[in-house]
Amino acid sequence: MSYNVNIIRTDYRVAHIEADDFGSLGFGEAYAQAEDNADIMANLYLRNRGELSRWFGVGQREGNLLSDIGYRALAPVTRAQQALSNQIDDVSEWVKGFADGFNHWCDEHRDELPEWYPQISPEDVHAAQWSAVCVGGAYAKLIALAQPPNGGSVKATMPLPDTRQNGSNAIAIGRQVTGSDRGLLLINPHFVWDGPGRFWEKHLSIPGRLNTYGINFIGCPGVSFGFNENLGWSHTRSFSIDTAFFRISTTPDAPLSYAYGDESRRIESQSVQVPVNNPDGDVETTTRQVWSSPHGLMISHPSIRWTETEALSFHDVCIDNSLLIEQWLAYASASSLEEFVDIAGSIAPTGVLHTTAVSADGNVFYRDTSGTVNLSDQALADWTRRLQSDPVAQSLERQGIVLLDGNDPAHLWWRPMQHCRAVCPRMTRRVIEARITRLTPMTVTG
């Protein structure tokens, strides 16, 4: 396949990428990203595949090995393979071009690059976008550490990752406050300065189809925070509940069995094999067991350890969120704020992010577009009562996690995942409705 793209660098090395089609746009976008951040991109793709140990050894305190085990259990690249058939043509062409652009840059510089730089596929690109805004990957090491009592060699644990640490600010101001016929939007994301999770600034153009400027995470196509001629938009960390932990009371003397209503269920294991580069340079395969219940993968948590009487399983509501790139494209292509309102979060929940926007003529919009826990009324009531007295539930709630009863069928994910119903921490937990604010400025923090 041939691509035709023009890349111009301006002040601060911002890349302005113009192409005639989405395949060429993705090619140029990845090529320019690789010029600036090839190491970060390569590490990101290896991490999502679970291949860090193959090239860098087990790491300090087995950090690489634990990450590889967890990511192989989460299987974002395998999930991306299943998602490819669900993409619109523009996105399919975009991610293929993006993969080809990174590979082409690597081929041009192969003699200068270390052996560990991977050749990537469209699946790697999809997996990169999933891992950027969904929380599942944050639990990879805790998945690897989860072992039944007396049943595994790994007994350590580690603190729960704080998935709220990257909260951001966004300020949208309408025309009656700006004193003009225009709106203002401040985009102030609080993400990392290096490694996966860092942003890359870009201008993307397909004449007559797309003209957008902004940022997205390194290794990912499109603009997730930015503007076009008609409006600007931003995201901050939502305070809705995006993760569920299921505390399971196991059967006495049988820590792999538990009652589920009137039924008996099992916690099952699967073998995960990871290639490991040993200090002598040989590559050997390490095999570890990971465990799961029908609720999801088991994890190790310092407050709820896997004992003879209880265990912990988790579920990320966005684990199968496969249409994020299409959602970013819809934002970037919106011709008006009214169109933006119609499509905001309607294609895919935006991971852990909610959304605010302002139009060029000074109207302001906000919606919680994150993926949220969709519970039965009974489960929501039970959890609300538990928050009054359970310090573990209280601690988890502050991190956007709901603690549910893994033995009670009423606490199952009984309705499809939805967004815009934010199960929030306090009295505002019920429903956040979409609204256009025409007179009042609004600040969104998260």
Image: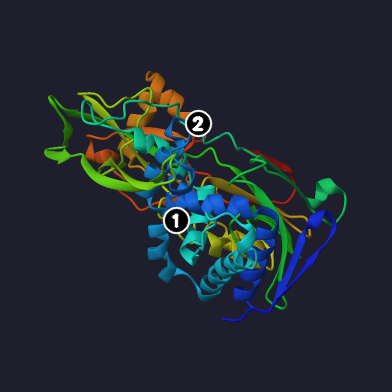
Locate the N terminus and report the quarter of the image it occupies.
Answer: bottom right
Q: Is residue 170 left or right of residue 72?
A: right
Task: Measure the alpha-carbon separation of dots 2 and 1.
Answer: 28 Å
SS type, badge 2:
loop
Q: Residue at x 49, y 60 (%)?
A: 124
Determine which residue is flagged by label 1: 321
| Res 404 → quadrant | top left
Q: Residue furthest front?
A: 280
**Looking at the picture, how far across and down is residue 178, in whole percent?**
84, 48
Res. 427 mark: 2
SS type, badge 1:
loop
Give yes or no for contact between labels 2 and 1 (Cβ–Cβ under 8 Å). no
Colour treatment of the image: rainbow
Q: Residue at x 34, y 39 (%)?
A: 377
| Res 445 → quadrant | top right
**Looking at the picture, how far across and down is residue 44, in whole percent?**
54, 50
**Looking at the picture, how far across and down is residue 303, in whole percent?**
37, 22
Tag 1: amino acid = Asn
| Of callouts 2 and 1, the N-terminal one | 1
Eyeballing the image, is 327 above or below 130? below
Label 1 CA crowd tier, 10 Å (few <14, some 14–19, many 20+): many
Q: Residue at x 42, y 61 (%)?
A: 80
Q: Is residue 137 left or right of residue 195?
A: left
Label 2 CA crowd tier, 10 Å (few <14, some 14–19, many 20+): few
Locate the C terminus and report the quarter of the image it occupies.
Answer: top right
Q: Residue furthest bottom?
A: 2
Res. 109 mark: none
- Camera-nearest residue between 350 and 434: 350
Residue 365 visible from this viewpoint: no
Q: Is residue 107 left or right of residue 143?
A: right
Q: Is residue 324 left or right of residue 58?
A: right
